Amino acid sequence: MAASLACPYCYETFTVREIMFRCSTQTSPAGKRCKRERDPVLVERRGLRGELGPVFTADGRTQLAPCPQCEAVTTFRICPVCHSTLPAQFGVVDNRLIAMVGAKASGKTVYMTVLLHELMNRVGARGGFALMAADDETMTRFGTDYQEPLYQDSQLFHGTRTAVANDNRVDPLVFRFGLERRRLLHSRPEHTLLSFFDTAGEDFNSHESIQVNTRYLANADGIILILDPLQFPGSRPLARPGSVLPQTEGEDSPINVLSRVTSMLLPYRAGGGLGARLRPSRRGAGRISTPIAVVFAKLDAFWDGLAPGSPLLAQPPGDERFHTADSLDVHEEVRHLLREWRGGAIDQILETNYQRYRYFGISALGNSPTADSRVAPTGIQPYRVTDPLLWLLSEFGSVARHGRG
């Protein structure tokens, strides 16, 4: 049976042979040229209304194909379901889909923006990584909708648009992650396509609304779950004075969000069931095979109360490898804090239902925002924001590990 791929834009699955092509509308050697037209599939699935070349079927295992109408050769390979243009070398390099989920106001969008900015700039240069947009739409959207408001205007985001309000669509950002892998006597570059989608917290407020994201979560290779530690009742007395305290109960509580995500994933990603693209081991039979990074954001609110020598006060190792011992130290420290915060039920759900999970403590901004939802005057000072993604990439084999885990 042919291995299935997942489109980094619509997350539907297909085989490499089923990949389709789009005419380039360039004049062929025979003097023919196809007319540009609106693609109704692309309008319905992605909301994109520009005029493009016609779509045709050919063997998707090839990187180029002649248009049957004008005979011009094209390199535009497209998803057979949503008709999005696939990134270069799709199906050749690793393709990893990353779902970023969490409750409303948990800081998902800020975290995603800072994570990608760090990988493209400071951390990427120091660690030997290279991150670049895989398409023009991602390049434009990340710049204008994410990076500029936060880094140039110092303005926090008002909230992610819900999938229901977006015609039941989620618009991922697709990047190419490159790393120079060192061997004994030589090195070679390795590339991984990363597709991130940021869901609105309201999409996890009920069983009905979470179904909108079923396909995206079921076909995701890894999940980054963002939780606000200030929502745990036991954490509030330990927080820095002046911290903005969100609600602790209701549909947006961490336990409810995790419970709904888990209930949705179990039929698809446990025991190799429907839609499972990663087959679990016998040891984890019946548990969800998708690795989940559980990220406790806004850690800066608790720094003053952490014990000297806490792993959450240490700077992470700064190279291209994932350091297992450092990560496990942080994992156990967060687990300890989770008990103090009276959030032990989170640990029970993860231990019972997931084959692979890891705790992380991060601060995307490094300080609490101002009362008018702006970045603090000290500027953006991120702490450990890349740890969750590097762990997922190490689970995929895309990043080397240092030490045994």
Image: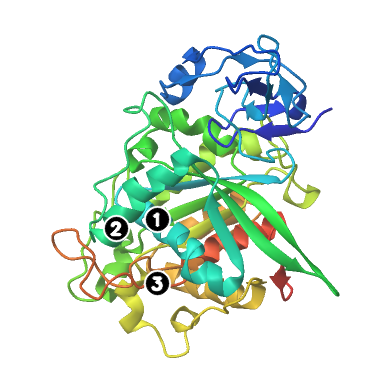
Q: In the shown orientation, is residue 58 left or right of residue 380?
A: right
Q: Which residue is mark 2?
A: 150
At which x and y percent is residue 361? 45, 69
Q: In the shown orientation, is residue 390 left or right of residue 189?
A: left
Q: Amino acid at mark 2?
A: Leu
Determine whether the residue tagged by mark 1 lies in a helix, strand or loop.
helix
At which x and y percent is residue 171? 44, 35
**Depth order, front residue of 306/116:** 116
At which x and y percent is residue 193? 62, 47
Q: Amino acid at mark 1?
A: Thr
Whether pointer 1 and pointer 2 mark residues with C-beta atoms closer than 8 Å, the reply is: yes
Q: Which residue is mark 3?
A: 340
Label 3 vs label 2, nearer the camera: 2
Q: Residue furthest left?
A: 372
Determine whether the residue tagged by mark 2 lies in a helix, strand or loop.
helix
Q: Which residue is mark 1?
A: 113
Residue at 47% over, 84% down: 310
**Depth order, front residue of 342/23:** 23
Sequence-earlier tag: 1 or 2: 1
